[in-house]
Amino acid sequence: MVFQDNFIVTTRGRGTSLITGDIQERVRRSGIRTGICNIFLHHTSASLILCENADPDVRSDLERYMAGLVPDGDPGFEHVAEGPDDMPAHIRTILTSSDMTLPVAAGSCDLGTWQGVYVWEHRTSGYRRRLTLTVYGDQARIDT
Amino acid sequence: MVFQDNFIVTTRGRGTSLITGDIQERVRRSGIRTGICNIFLHHTSASLILCENADPDVRSDLERYMAGLVPDGDPGFEHVAEGPDDMPAHIRTILTSSDMTLPVAAGSCDLGTWQGVYVWEHRTSGYRRRLTLTVYGDQARIDT
Amino acid sequence: MVFQDNFIVTTRGRGTSLITGDIQERVRRSGIRTGICNIFLHHTSASLILCENADPDVRSDLERYMAGLVPDGDPGFEHVAEGPDDMPAHIRTILTSSDMTLPVAAGSCDLGTWQGVYVWEHRTSGYRRRLTLTVYGDQARIDT
């Protein structure tokens, strides 16, 4: 069976928003015990990442690293009408990901202890970001 | 139910080929209303990306950025027998993606307004690139 | 129907471990003919990649390239308690991937000739890395 739901994450400019809870709540609601959960972000200037969820320094180091890898206002960019952070946001999205498919086991997404799912906003302003979550699987536990 | 189809995209050297239409046509043909659509590229020197689909400068800026990030003919590379663009093509593929899984809703891939799916050729010559599209889901609409 | 299994890959520090055989053996065991196979790595300092599987120089060039792109011991990092290779390992994971979804056709993962699936360890020490493989599809071949 399939379960599908949409939700919005409101960002406040560059940085990460933890959505592990939003995902797990919907997977539980689906009643699916064994299968997969696809998460999709409908934008080209924010992305989905799996990141260490314990030490907030990891996310600030990541942000600082990415700002160096894809500098805002690079004079080589032609696509500048939407601001100096827009083309870098598109590149940052492509270097990370817009979709993620996770295993569902025992009725929830089977994440590692230190794995958190985050929406990573790449624009300097905040936006309403739309996500779709689709769970596919069986309601009874499958022994393999 | 499952639907699966293969198709070829013929590239003309480095650059992007829009395949959103090829995907949507096959999803419609599958008759699946709610589920997921997996797209897979069977190569290690071209990739699949979701990119802004309105301003062509975004794709040319992206190409220029990537050429700087992974320079052709890097003297550190040992894998050079297939040309100075081959090892960079493998790296560019790994920094982006070969697979993509998108939500299907109301009978088509539910992409954001500005999201286009592209095959990104990383070799300087053109190639015939093979893709497999698999749609999984239910034919009736699921209310959640 | 759904099939799910877990397995461990023991790494020996930075480098790649080929797992194509581990995957294909489980897909065959599932009995599924047509569908998708999701592979997921439950860690934030190792990743899953599809890489050229013929010339080992490709993987050593890739390793050298990544060591230059994300240098160990970068003085800008705050997250250093777990060693100079830990924050780089988190970034390398985010620039590559933790999940992969492949098409299943004729009872096995339909990979390109030169595509191998690898666990890429990003820490300088070896670890036991846990993976979950989920196959979803139909046992009979679907003609499309």
Image: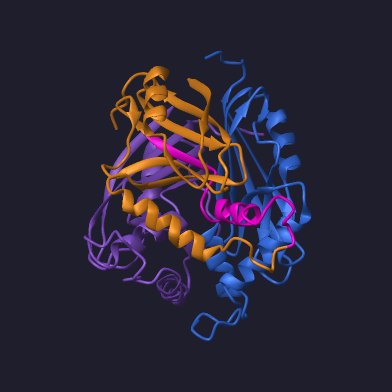
Chain colours: A purple, B orange, C blue
Q: Tag count in the figure?
A: 0
Residue B60: image location, x then y, percent: 39, 53
C107 and A105: which one is in front? C107
In magenta stretch: residue A75: no
- Which quarter of the rendered picture does the C terminus of chain B lie within? top left
Q: Residue at x 64, y 31 (%)?
A: C110
C37 on left or right of A24: right
In magenta stretch: residue B85: yes
B59 and B136: which one is in front? B59
Camera sees residue A19:
no
Q: Residue at x 55, y 55 (%)?
A: B92
Residue C31: image location, x then y, percent: 68, 24
Camera sees residue B24:
yes
Which residue in the rendered view is the most extreme toward the bottom?
A: C75
C143 to B47, vertically: above or below? above
Residue C58: image location, x then y, percent: 71, 56
Give the residues drawn in magenta, as a range: B78-103
Residue A137: image location, x then y, percent: 49, 32
Which residue in the rendered view is the most extreme toward the top?
A: C143
C134 and C100: which one is in front? C100
Q: Residue at x 46, y 39 (%)?
A: B101
